[in-house]
Amino acid sequence: MSRPVPAAAPAAVPPLRPGALVLLTAAVTALAAAGVLPRWPGLVHLVALPPLDLIADLRLLMAVSSGYPQFLAGLAAALALRVTVLAFLLGGARGPALRYAARYYLAVLPAALPAAGLLLGAGALLFYGLFWAGTAAVLLVTALTAAVPWAAPPRLARGCATAARHGMRLGTVGACLAALAVIGAVADVTRPAGPVLLVPVSALLTFAAARALRADPGLRAVRRLVAAVPAAGIAALALVAATGPAGPPTAPEPQEPRPGSLMLMSGVDSASGLGAILEIDPHTLGYRCGQTFYYSYAGPGDGQPRNLAMCPPTGGAPYGPGDTLRPTAELITFLEAQLTSLPRPVTLATHSQGVWITWEAAADGRLPGVSELVLTGPFPQNPVPYPPQGEPGRSRPAADVARLVAGLPRPGGTSAFEPDSPLGREWLARPRAVGRTLARPLPPGVRALGVASVFDLPLMPGGPDLPGAADACPVPVIHPNLPYATEFRRAVTAFLERRPLPDCPRWRSLVGPVFRPFAVPAVEPAGRPPAGRRRAVVSGRL
């Protein structure tokens, strides 16, 4: 009688081998220390868990490539490097491990490219919507694919099925993302040395996460709890964005109106009487309609269509979205002419691109009668300048992505913004254009207040501070709705009355450092503001 054949023992899972990851970490650290790689907080993503590492490669390549041959060559090199490192981690650079790693990265590449492209377009156009859409795409791709490489080589389909049966190991992946967010935030606030020094810490996190995904050890409840914290934070940010003010509040006429006059100047894509800052009720800021005037991007005139403006425009020529893209010198001439006859002192409140135009006009001494500037939604830098259409140059992919996304439909219609318009070329395409202008001192007697949106902070590599201006606490509403927010009115009122600005909850200042590592590295590096100035901004006492 034959003996029963014992069942074959399951094949042992080969241990992870960190040697290649260690070499990659040393190379990234050395290249960043030498200045070859940018020292932006996203540097820690170059050694992060796949697919975050490939998405970081794409962001970096898109920002620095001068043409598509260079970008494709860099992409091929990045894929070869990533495949080799992952294969070594999975047990060695043998045929099955290499094929598995190659299939994984080629499978995630079609999703990683548009995610990186959205982040690139956000940096080039300074458009908050593209950044948050790109960040959401990165997090989604990571949540759906980060557990796959460690599940069941050598077949990718089996790895996907195994990961799906375990819920994509979202507890472990989410906990890793939470820890990486902390590392990235620390890297951001400790630049320029912080990102370099924290690369090994990020690599250690990657190896620990890979081991957990490979073996799925205990403490599952702890990992899920850690993952739930940032998930709840992101959900809260989405809720804040979705439930922000949709229109301007109204107020009774002030008993004692402020002296002088108020001029309201909108930003890109606005038109006569159509634009968030044009629609606010001036009574909420202490002015009456007889004191309120509306800037026209078409120049002086006898009046404009009222549309949604609270007060009837009594001056300026009718203008449309295309007029907001005129050359800056022409717009400053129009602004000077429309200010000349206004009762003084003049408070000039502007939004978005108007910040750059009014600051340059002020620095040139061409704002007659203006004593206060209210700068709503300012961007202190243009971090990803792009070359003119049809010409080679650094960030060539950024130029094409900017042109593509500028023509896409948005809520409310299609934007009229053109990256190659005179204004776009002067401010966004030209390296350091915004930073150079805002570094110019304001003339004596002119005070300025900057009021940023919390949702714009990740697109500000050097932070939201404006040199020579008081900086209000960032407001938790999206960029277009800033003039509608109650906190905007409180900050402006305190500024005009020379009272201390309202205090700032700490979480608002943290949104930038936490999410800035997902942004495209600035082509022109931006420094950090002095520590003393940052403390003044947070306290609201500047």
Image: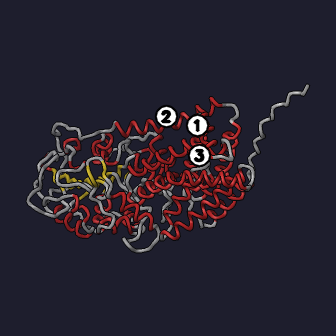
Instruction: Give neighbour class at mark 2: few <14, some 14-19, many 20+ (Cα, 10 Å).
Output: few
Question: As drawn, which residue projects farthest toward the top?
Answer: 1
Image height of 75 relative to 179, above or below: below
Q: Which of the two discs, 3 and 2, labels the residue nearer the N terminus?
A: 3
Q: Residue at x 22, y 41 (%)?
A: 284
Front of the two marks 3 and 1: 1
Q: Residue 164: which numbered mark, if any?
A: 1
Instruction: Give neighbour class at mark 3: few <14, some 14-19, many 20+ (Cα, 10 Å).
Output: many
Image quadrant assignment for residue 433 = bottom left
Residue 370's spot in the image, x, y percent?
23, 59
Question: As drawn, which residue projects farthest toward the front?
Answer: 1
The disc labelled 3 sits on which kind of residue?
Answer: Leu
Q: Which of the two discs, 2 and 1, labels the residue nearer the N terminus?
A: 1
| Residue in front for this viewpoint, 40 or 154 | 154
Q: Residue 232: which numbered mark, if any?
A: 2
* Secondary structure category for the residue under label 2: helix
Q: How is the image coloured?
A: secondary structure
Q: Distance of mark 3 from mark 2, alpha carbons?
A: 16 Å
User: Can residue 15 be seen?
Assistant: yes
Residue 367's spot in the image, x, y percent?
24, 63
Question: As drawn, which residue projects farthest toward the left?
Answer: 302
In contact (CB < 8 Å): disc 3 and disc 2: no
Left or right: where 224 falls relative to 249: right
| Residue in front for this viewpoint, 187 or 214 | 214
Q: Distance of mark 3 from mark 1, alpha carbons?
A: 23 Å
Residue 265's spot in the image, x, y percent?
23, 55
Residue bearing the label numbered 3: 180
Q: Distance of mark 2 from mark 1, alpha carbons?
A: 23 Å
Q: Residue at x 50, y 66 (%)?
A: 64
| Residue in front for this viewpoint, 59 or 108 | 108
The disc labelled 1 sits on which kind of residue?
Answer: Ala
The quarter of the image holding the N terminus is: top right
